[in-house]
Amino acid sequence: MPASTADRLFDRLGKGKAPPVVLLLGADPYWRDVCRRKLEEALVPESARQWALGRVSAADVDAAEVVGRAQSQPMLAPQQVLFVGDVEAWEKGSDEKDKKLESRLKALTLYFEDPAPFTVLVLEAEKLDQRTRFARLLGEHALVVDLDASGADPVALAAAMARERGVELDPAALHALVEATGGRAARMAVELDKLACYAGESRRIDADDVRSLVVAEGTAEVWELANLLASGERGRALALVDDLLSRGETAPGLVGAMAWMFRKLVAASELPAGTNQFQAARQLGMRPASAQTAIAHAHRLSRAQLRDSLVALAEADDRLKSAGKDERGVMQFLVARLSRPPAPGERRKTR
């Protein structure tokens, strides 16, 4: 299923070319809310939203009913947006439900071939099995927005989120925020709301404000994981990942945080010999203590290991986007790969 980042959807909306069917696919709550808001603002005037915005769950209504609503002209508005959540419910089934699946596929296929010109149908799912006919049908006819895409620069994203809230973070503050949150969009949004309240009328936030108000618990755990991987302690690393998943961390979010961490390790590995933690902090955009940690871990891994780790993380990200994959299985395989012992002569000497 070809997927895009949210920017492609925003570009279409900005040009007045809204797709008739959109699939918001993924678990990231920040990007889901942003996409919903952009669709509402671009397509339905605020005065008409009481009549021209619809929200239903696929767990409660079937496809034929949704198609019927999409084909019904909205009252007092030229265009409507219909959000359908929990679309995963439509792809699952036993033998009896398989008959329902055939009915759903038929209803959706007929609608996709001739969508109502006054409706934008927005389907939402955290995960779909890409092997099913249902997922392939959506992939062929909908603009698929990958909510868990990790390609956005987290520093640039943090700056944009700050502008939306009418506050300004200096570069050091932006880096401190990304470090404290692991670059996870949903967490940055929550912390920026808190920082914006703290800033008051000044609307300015510096790095000390971030360090005082943002608890870097998620990042501490990611660095603990880095330590276990660098030490080759596979069992403990697997246990930590399992614990994070059990506490509600999403696998794509965890992979994104690990990718951020390994990019910092690569940058730390390229610093000149003798660089102290304060010099490293400025160059890496991190707190001095974290910069020292990054240097220590980076020098325990070879360049080949660091490079292979980034490749492994990218491949894990791709696997997680194939919804038929077991997330815990993907994460276990990733940890096993990242904690492998170095090949002979591969490990670097600690400076």
Image (cartoon, grey):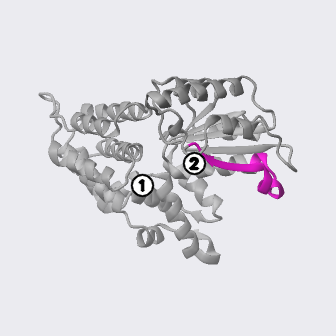
Q: Which mark is residue 32?
A: 2
- Quarter of the image for residue 276 reads bottom left
**Element class at badge 2:** helix
- The amino acid at mark 2 is Arg
Left or right: 62 as drawn, with respect to 129: right
Residue, x 67% and y 39% (percent of image)?
66
Inspect this view and state whether residue 205 appears: no
- The amino acid at mark 1 is Gly
Residue 331 included in the magenta stretch of the image: no
Residue, x 15% and y 34% (percent of image)?
341
Residue 45 included in the magenta stretch of the image: yes
Could you say where residue 196 lies in the image, as x and y percent from the top left?
Answer: 58, 69
Tell me which numbered mark, 2 or 1, is placed earlier along the sequence. 2
Could you say where residue 192 lies in the image, as x and y percent from the top left?
Answer: 53, 64
Inspect this view and state whether residue 122 appears: yes
- Establish if 54 lies above or below 103: below
Residue range highlighted in magenta: 42-58
Residue placed furthest toward the left? 344
Q: Which one is closest to the eye, mark 2 or mark 1?
A: 2
Q: Which mark is residue 161?
A: none
Residue, x 63% and y 48% (percent of image)?
56
Left or right: 8 as drawn, with respect to 78: left
**Element class at badge 1:** loop
Mark 2 is surrounded, within 10 Å at the Cα level, by few (under 14), some (14 to 19) or many (20 or more) other residues, namely many
Left or right: 231 as drawn, with respect to 40: left
- Quarter of the image for residue 349 reads top left
Could you say where residue 183 lies in the image, as x and y percent from the top left?
Answer: 45, 52
- The CA span between labels 2 and 1 is 29 Å
List the residue tagged with mark 1.
285
